[in-house]
């Protein structure tokens, strides 16, 4: 998919573990893994909102469009 | 509320008390059908032959047709029971629900064909209109039921696709 989720970069910058991140956002670790692996098909705005709040970033910092 | 918690489950929309009494009624209905098959049906056919010995040749064919018809109703009851279990466990929107729905549709189709056969036969032989009129009503009712089940199946198919799609949303 040409939309890439840059979650691992943002997590590494903040030295935040997947488990802690999942807890803070309110996602299951399994769904965080789906996001990180680029297998996610759709994300709720409310999920995106929680991610941005927890990481203190903008949606554009997490989502990126790349040509196929 | 967690972000994952949006999926509405059956417990949010269906009162918990509905399914158990429904299953009790289905069980009683099933028992009634067994009593009908095992006692009433052979008894009334024997009585028919006693009253009018000329009906002896149709005794067993009629028994077979009526017995099959009652089995069709039992199949519908069993399939409905299984589907209610799936509803209760919130697994109804799943490919595994469809064989039970198909079972209901097949049983209603067979019952409809049997009723049409009985109607044609009764229409040709009966000397009073009572039985053909009742049979006509049953043919119409089972036709409506069968076609409604086809519509319900299509709706279930749509809902299953939607649920599958929604399950992928994070």
Image (cartoon, coloured by chain):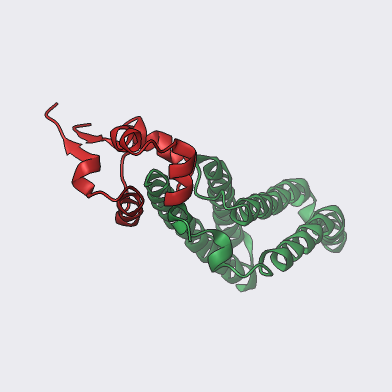
The quadrant of the image that shows the C terminus of chain A is top left
**Visual hue assigned to chain A:** red
Q: Nearer the viewer, residue A2 or A17?
A: A17
Residue B140 visible in the picture: yes
Q: Nearer the viewer, residue B7 or A54?
A: A54
Q: Position of residue B119 (x, y in %)?
A: 57, 59
Query: Is B93 above or below relative to B30?
Result: above
Query: Is A41 above or below relative to B159?
Result: above
Residue at 76 percent across and 64 percent down: it is B24
The quadrant of the image that shows the N terminus of chain A is top left
How many marks on residues?
A: 0
Q: Position of residue A34 (x, y in %)?
A: 39, 35
Identify the residue at the far left of this view: A67
Chain in green? B
Residue at 58 percent across and 67 percent down: it is B14
Residue B136 visible in the picture: no
Position of B115 with respect to A9 (left or right) is: right
Q: Position of residue B146 (x, y in %)?
A: 50, 56
Q: Position of residue A51 (x, y in %)?
A: 34, 49
Position of A2 with respect to B96 (left or right) is: left
Position of B82 with respect to A56 (left or right) is: right
Q: Nearer the viewer, residue B107 or B118?
A: B107
Residue at 53 percent across and 67 percent down: it is B13
Residue at 66 percent across and 67 percent down: it is B16
């Amino acid at each position: 998919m040409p939309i890439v989720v840059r979650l691992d970069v943002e997590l590494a910058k903040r030295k935040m573990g997947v488990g802690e991140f999942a807890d803070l956002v309110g996602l299951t670790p399994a769904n965080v893994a789906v996001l990180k692996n680029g297998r996610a098909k759709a994300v709720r705005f409310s999920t995106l909102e929680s991610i941005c709040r927890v990481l203190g970033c903008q949606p554009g910092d997490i989502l990126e469009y790349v040509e196929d | 509320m967690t972000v994952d918690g949006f999926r509405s489950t059956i417990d949010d929309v269906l009162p918990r008390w509905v399914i158990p009494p429904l299953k009790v009624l289905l069980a009683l209905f099933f028992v009634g059908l067994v009593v009908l098959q095992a006692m009433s049906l052979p008894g009334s056919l024997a009585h028919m032959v006693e009253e009018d010995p000329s009906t002896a040749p149709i005794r067993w064919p009629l028994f077979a047709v009526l017995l099959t018809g009652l089995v069709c109703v039992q199949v519908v009851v069993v399939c409905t029971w299984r589907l209610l279990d799936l509803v209760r466990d919130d697994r109804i929107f799943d490919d595994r629900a469809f064989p039970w729905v198909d079972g209901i549709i097949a049983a209603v189709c067979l019952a409809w064909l049997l009723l049409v056969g009985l109607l044609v036969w009764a229409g040709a032989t009966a000397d009073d209109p009572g039985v053909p009129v009742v049979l006509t009503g049953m043919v119409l009712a089972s036709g409506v039921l069968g076609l409604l089940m086809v519509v319900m199946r299509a709706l279930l198919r749509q809902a299953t696709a939607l649920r599958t799609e929604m399950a992928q949303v994070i």
